[in-house]
Each structure stands twice: as structure tokens, then as C-alpha cells.
Image (spheres, helix red, strand yellow):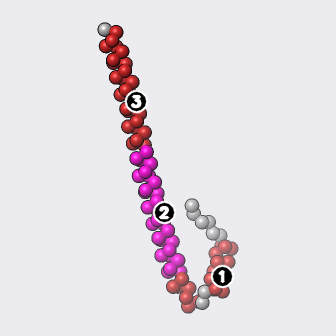
Amino acid sequence: MMLNFGLFELLIIASLALIFIKPQKIPEFMKSLGVAVSRIKDMKSELRRMFNFQLDDNVKDHLVHTLEQEIERVEQTNNSNQGDS
């Protein structure tokens, strides 16, 4: 999900930053904010990777189950055909 900030929102954020953070500390604050955003993005990517891996396992389990059912159906059909002979 992307945050969509317009010019007005950015001006409000910049004004608040000047009020609550000393002007000399703004570069340090921005660096810390950048590091935090980077870590959040990394965590999001890791969670997505883990979710996709789990999803792949669930798909594999479903396929195995479906194949087992199909094998049983074919075996039952084969057994009933042998009984007819």
C-alpha cells in the first residue's frame, strides 16, 4: 500500500518537523526515518516471501490429495473391471 501525499500534506509534515525537531537535527531524523522505512520494507518482503512459500506448500498438499483420490478411483475402476472379466 502506497501512501499518497500531496503538496499540502508534505508542507504540513515539514512545518511540524520544524516545530518539534530542531533544524540541526532534521538530517539525523530523516536518516533514521529512512532506515526505519527500509527495515519495514524488508520485513514486508520477508513476510510476503514466507506467505508465498506457505501458499506453495498448501497447493502442493492439495495436489497430492487430489492425485491420491484419483489413484484410488482408478484402482477401484480397475478392480471392478477385473471382477467383470
Badge 1 marks a residue whose secondary structure is: helix
Q: Identify the residue at the far top of this view.
A: 85
Q: Callout 1, which amino acid?
A: Leu
Q: Quickly name the residue at label 1.
A: 16
Nearer the observer, 66 or 36 = 66
- The amino acid marked with disc number 3 is Gln
* Residue highlighted by disc 2: 44
Q: Residues within 10 Å of mark 1 (few under 14, many from 20)?
A: few
Left/right placement of residue 48 relative to residue 71 reads right
Q: Marks 1 and 2: in contact by CB < 8 Å? A: no
> Which residue is located at x 41 percent, y 52 percent?
53
Q: Residue at x 37, y 21 (%)?
A: 76
| Residue drawn 40% across the image and 47% down it | 57
The residues tagged by marks 2 and 1 sit, at their Cα atoms, a distance apart of 28 Å
- Marks 1 & 3, CB-CB < 8 Å contact: no
Q: Quadrant of residue 69?
A: top left
In this view, 84 is above or below 24: above
Residue 70, quarter of picture:
top left
Residue 69: which numbered mark, if any? 3
The residue segment tinted magenta is: 30-58
Pick the front one: 4 or 69: 69
Q: Amino acid at mark 2?
A: Lys
Under tag 3, what secondary structure?
helix
Secondary structure, magenta segment, majority class: helix
37, 82: nearer the viewer: 82
- Per the image, is 67 magenta? no
* Label 2: how many Cα within 10 Å (few below 14, some 14–19, many 20+): few
Q: Nearer the viewer, mark 2 or mark 1?
A: 2
